[in-house]
Each structure stands twice: as structure tokens, then as C-alpha cells.
Image (cartoon, rainbow, N blue to C red):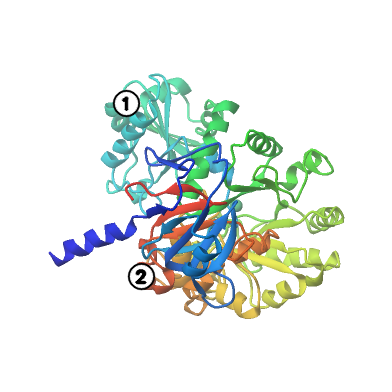
């Protein structure tokens, strides 16, 4: 009984009660099918809104500061102080939002992810096992596909595409076959993309469409799984058998893609983010996002990083202006990729990987995709044009290269370039003072400690693995840092990001570098003030302070008061962007 009462009380506490002393012109949210619709035309006159009665953490300063009330006006924070002062200031002409004990923070700022992946994936089904998804066996995967089919009203000859499928993480411990899929989907084409992205399972209709049957020869470097005792394809295609099929998949039209920008932004908003980064943008992505902005489809701040491989298309082209917003879209910085990933053993490291390279190479240290000379030349060209730079560097060898480049360019911290070293995963301790001296700033990826921590110990040894994404050492050295998901490499869930920075626990339960664990406030800084500074917006967002954007996230629990083991159980209750509630949890 006692438990029931507590549950009922908790449910009550979640509700926002909205009181107002004057009639509202228009409500700005409408409950929908799991998502909240955004009203495209804002009310003609925004009333002042005062939030109160919760843990309002400002993130302003090195230690946690709470305020009693926050007032927003015209999309900005107009007042921070007590509720009584706020009511006096606005002569009670306010809309009051009672937080009822929930926690309010500045909106989370995504420091590095791939927004276009969200646009492309939002029309696909997550069939991954926990923690990325929820399917733990084949019937549950089928159920997910069925639910998607129903929700999206897929035409009879349409496609259903799932992502995140991993045969090792389902109870059956075997590959799904076309037989499993055909029973539920005899007519529609179904494809489950493997978590490695190097293969997929197709049902009979999809295999037929791909022209793969018993007579199809297995191409060199490819795999076509066959039914036992026959030459019939079983469903699984890998590598060279899969790549041409993937390349032929029908692409959504531009209009369909533009429509998908809304659910894609809602993926971020439902995770508390008010900023999304498109972390490696092709020229066509820039054009697409510019069009979305022009049509006023963007309601989060979306920042793009044009990639160095297409510099001839955007560099010096007046069409692509860096550094200023237009309808919520900004081209932030150029992106250079130096190396690959440590889990794929393609990150450039200074000591050979244990057990050789990905193809069994001896003394394998990974590779860079660019030479030192090219890196120097491109960096100089960008800096001469005053374009900031985000550089993908995972291995310590790649980090060494970038440090050399910055030294060659004669740049130091006083130039305030804020060059973001995306991932900076396998820094060596001596890199930290170099970052300080040269004005480099790391965007870490502490989720690696969970997802690949065990793999890193095997691949590069305990010492280097334990210093992966060294948030604590960087903070102690005086660096401003951020912490990212690299979505769609890992899910957008911010509580996992915060938890991984605090716990650094691997899948098998090993603490990956106990001395690099940080407190909740530091973990939150890496999602608020850190990323704001990295994109030169520290005076615009990332803190609850007068004059800053009214961008907020409302959480069920206060991370500063939770046990580390509870951090992941938190929930985003609402997300506010420039004063408008863009996401509100259904059922509240
Ligand atoms: Zn990335």
C-alpha cells in the first residue's frame, strides 16, 4: 500500500500544473502519438513565463548553483531570482509553470553527432538489443517491425528497414533467416541491417527484388548464407554480396527527407537536446539543411561541419557562410578526419595493437587518411580564412599529428581558435598541457568505456585503455571539455553519457580508469557549458542566466542528488527551446 501511494505521488509530481493570470493566445504544444507537435506560428505575443518550485541548476560557475525561479520573455532568459521578485517585476502578468520538484537545467548541447543520420534513420526501425534498443529475441524483433508497419502505414510493396540487428545479442544466438521474416511479412520487403553495417538479413520478397536466388554465385569477398542442405539463400548477405544491394535501396525524395527533419529533431529534443551537430557534412547535406532552414523547418539549433574531402565545393564559396545563424542553421567549422576507430583497430596509435591489425597485419598501428603535409596545408588555409576547425583524432598518433600541425601553423591558445579535437580518446598524459598551450579542446566519448572498454584493454593494454577520454585529468589541467554520443555510433540518451563519465564501467563490469571518473556536475558541464564554449556560444546558451536563450531541459530527477547507479534511470520530462515547449513527455 505504502509503495502504491509513493508511485501515485511520484506520478503526480511529474505533472506540470500550468497556471496563468492572463488568457493565453495559444497553447504551444499538443499531445500527439508519442511526439509533441510544434505549432509553426508562434503566438503573436509571448507572455512572460516563470518556472518555479524545482531544482533549477544554473550551470553558471564551477560549483552547482540553484535559483528559485527563472523568467523567460521573447525566447530569452529575462530574470533569475526568487519567485516573489519575479511576480513583482512583471506585476503578476505571467504564466506560471510549477516544476513540482523536478529538475531544470540549460538545454543539453550536442557536442558531436551526425544529425543527417537521424534524418535518414528516423524512417527505420530500431531492432537492436539493450541498451541501444529493447529487442532481446527474434519474436520481439518481428513485433517491432510489425508495430512500425502499422504506425507508418507502409504500402504493400514498400520497404521495412531495421537497424542495429546483432545475432550475438539475441537469445537465439543465431542469424534470423528469411523463413522467420516471411511468416510475418509475406508481401512487403524487409531488411535488417547488421550492427556492423557490413551486412543485412533480407526476407524472400527483398531477396527477389535484389535478384538473389539459388543460382546466384557468391561474389568474391562476399557472403550469401544458404539454407541447410540447399543452395537457397537463407537471408543473410555480407560485405560484397550486401554492398551492391544496399547501394540500390530506394532513396527518399527531397520532400520526404525535408519532412523527416521534424521527427529527427524530435529524437534530439526527446533526449533533452536543444542543439544538434551534423558532424561531417557533404555539400549536398549543407544544401539540404539550408533548404530546411529556409523553409523554417528547424527548431533546434543545427550546426554543420563541412568535410575536408569536398573542400573544393564549399571553400571560398559565398553560398556557404560560416559562423552565423540563419533560421536556426549555422555552418560552424570545417571537419577533418585524421584516423579511424580504436575498436576497429583503424585509429592511428604510437604502439602496435595487440594481436595485429584488422586483417591480421603485423606491427599494426592503424593509418591516417591524410599526410602531415596535407593536414598542415589545409589547416593553414582554413585558419587564414578564419574558419574554425573540428578534427577527428582517436589514436595518440593522430593527436600527435594535429599537435604538430598547430605548432607548424604558429597557433597558440591566445589566438582563441578553439580547435575541437573530436574524440581525443587515446590521449597520452603529456598531451593535456599541449592542448592548453595550443588552445585545443577535446570532445570526449566516455561511452566507449561501456561499449568497447573490454575490447580496448585487449587491443591496446590496460594502461592506455584506462586513460581513454580522461575527463578528470583534462578538468584538472584546466581544459574545457565536452562529451558526446557520436550518434548514430551510440544512442543519444544523455543519461548514459553522464553515467559513463561518472562510472566508466564496461559491459563486463570493469571500471575503465577509476581515477578518471568525475562527479555529476562535471559530467553535466560537458553537456552544457563545455559544448557552448566549443562553438563560441558561451554567452548565448549553456547556462541559466539573464540574457541567455530560454533553452531548458526538465528532468525527473536531479543528477546531482542521485546515486551513480541510478543516473541512467532519469527521464527527460520536457525540452524548451527559446521559450517554446518543443517536447513534453506523454502522459504528464
Ligand atoms: Zn562522428
242 or 109, nearer to the observer: 109
Along the line of sight, the residue nearer the viewer: 266 or 456: 266
Residue designated by label 1: 185
Q: CA distance from mark 2 to mark 1?
A: 41 Å
For residue 257, side relative to residue 237 (left or right): right
Q: Position of residue 358 (x, y in %)?
A: 55, 54
* Tag count: 2
* Displayed quadrant of residue 423: bottom right
Q: Secondary structure at mark 1?
A: loop
Please tell me in which quadrant of the rendered image residue 52 appears: bottom left
Q: Earlier in the sequence, mark 2 or mark 1?
A: 1
On screen, 274 above or below 151?
A: below
The residue that disc 2 covers is 565
Q: Percent from the top left, x then y, of residue 292? A: 63, 35
**For the residue with label 1, is its CB less than 8 Å from the closest atom of ligand 1?**
no
Nearer to me, 344 or 445:
445
Residue 299 falls left or right of residue 564: right
User: Is the distance from the Cβ of mark 2 to the nearest ligand 1 atom less than 8 Å?
Assistant: no
User: Above or below — where is 183 with respect to 487?
Assistant: above
The residue at the point 42 percent across, 56 percent down is 572
SS class, disc 2: helix
Amino acid at each position: 500500500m505504502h509503495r502504491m501511494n509513493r508511485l501515485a505521488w511520484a506520478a503526480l509530481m511529474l505533472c506540470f500544473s500550468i497556471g496563468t493570470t492572463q488568457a493565453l493566445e495559444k497553447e504551444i504544444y499538443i499531445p500527439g502519438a508519442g511526439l509533441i507537435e510544434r505549432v509553426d506560428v508562434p503566438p503573436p505575443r509571448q507572455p512572460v513565463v516563470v518556472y518555479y518550485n524545482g531544482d533549477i541548476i544554473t550551470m553558471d560557475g564551477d560549483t552547482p548553483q540553484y535559483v528559485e525561479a527563472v523568467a523567460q520573455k521573447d525566447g530569452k532568459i529575462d530574470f533569475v531570482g526568487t519567485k516573489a521578485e519575479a511576480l513583482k517585476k512583471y506585476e503578476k502578468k505571467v504564466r506560471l509553470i510549477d516544476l513540482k520538484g523536478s529538475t531544470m537545467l540549460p538545454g543539453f548541447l550536442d557536442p558531436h553527432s551526425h544529425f543527417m543520420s537521424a534524418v535518414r534513420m528516423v524512417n527505420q526501425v530500431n531492432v537492436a538489443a539493450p541498451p541501444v534498443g529493447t529487442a532481446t529475441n527474434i519474436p520481439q524483433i518481428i513485433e517491432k517491425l510489425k508495430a512500425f508497419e502499422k504506425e507508418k502505414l507502409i504500402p504493400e510493396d514498400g520497404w521495412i528497414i531495421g537497424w542495429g540487428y546483432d545475432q550475438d545479442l539475441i537469445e537465439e544466438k543465431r542469424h534470423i533467416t528469411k523463413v522467420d521474416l516471411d511468416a510475418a511479412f509475406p508481401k512487403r520487403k524487409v531488411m535488417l541491417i547488421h550492427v556492423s553495417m557490413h551486412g543485412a538479413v533480407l526476407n524472400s520478397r527483398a531477396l527477389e527484388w535484389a535478384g538473389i536466388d539459388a543460382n546466384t554465385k557468391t561474389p568474391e569477398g562476399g557472403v550469401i548464407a544458404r539454407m541447410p542442405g540447399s543452395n537457397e539463400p537463407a537471408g543473410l548477405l555480407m560485405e560484397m554480396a550486401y554492398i551492391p544491394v544496399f547501394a540500390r535501396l530506394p532513396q527518399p525524395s527531397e520532400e520526404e527527407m525535408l519532412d523527416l527533419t521534424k521527427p529527427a529533431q524530435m529524437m534530439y529534443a526527446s533526449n533533452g537536446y536543444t542543439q544538434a551537430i551534423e558532424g561531417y557534412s557533404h555539400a549536398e547535406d549543407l544544401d539540404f539543411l539550408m533548404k530546411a532552414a529556409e523553409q523554417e523547418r528547424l527548431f533546434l539549433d543545427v550546426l554543420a561541419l563541412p568535410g575536408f574531402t569536398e573542400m573544393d565545393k564549399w571553400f571560398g564559396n559565398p553560398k556557404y557562410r560560416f559562423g552565423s545563424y540563419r533560421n536556426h542553421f549555422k555552418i560552424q567549422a570545417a571537419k577533418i578526419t585524421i584516423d579511424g576507430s580504436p575498436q576497429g583497430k583503424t585509429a592511428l596509435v604510437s604502439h602496435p595493437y595487440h594481436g595485429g591489425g584488422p586483417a591480421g597485419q603485423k606491427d599494426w598501428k592503424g593509418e591516417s587518411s591524410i599526410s602531415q603535409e596535407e593536414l598542415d596545408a589545409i589547416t593553414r588555409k582554413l585558419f587564414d580564412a578564419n574558419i574554425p576547425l573540428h578534427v577527428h583524432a582517436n589514436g595518440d598518433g593522430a593527436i600527435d599529428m594535429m599537435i604538430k600541425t598547430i605548432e607548424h601553423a604558429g597557433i597558440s591558445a591566445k589566438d582563441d581558435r578553439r580547435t575541437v579535437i573530436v574524440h581525443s580518446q587515446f590521449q597520452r598524459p603529456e598531451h593535456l598541457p599541449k592542448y592548453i598551450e595550443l588552445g585545443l579542446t577535446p570532445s570526449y566519448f566516455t561511452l566507449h568505456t561501456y561499449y568497447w572498454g573490454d575490447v580496448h584493454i585487449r587491443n591496446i593494454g590496460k594502461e592506455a585503455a584506462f586513460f581513454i577520454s580522461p575527463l578528470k585529468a583534462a578538468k584538472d589541467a584546466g581544459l574545457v571539455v565536452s562529451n558526446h554520443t557520436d550518434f548514430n555510433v551510440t544512442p543519444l540518451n544523455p543519461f548514459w553519457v553522464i553515467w559513463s563519465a561518472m562510472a566508466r564501467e564496461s559491459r563486463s563490469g570493469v571500471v575503465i580508469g577509476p581515477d578518471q571518473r568525475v562527479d555529476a556536475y562535471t559530467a553535466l558541464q560537458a553537456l552544457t557549458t563545455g559544448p557552448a564554449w566549443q562553438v563560441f556560444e558561451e554567452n548565448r546558451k549553456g547556462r541559466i542566466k539573464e540574457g541567455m536563450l530560454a533553452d531548458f531541459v526538465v528532468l525527473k530527477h536531479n543528477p546531482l542528488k542521485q546515486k551513480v547507479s541510478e543516473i541512467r534511470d532519469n527521464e527527460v520530462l520536457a525540452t524548451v527551446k527559446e521559450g517554446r515547449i518543443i517536447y513534453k513527455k506523454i502522459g504528464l
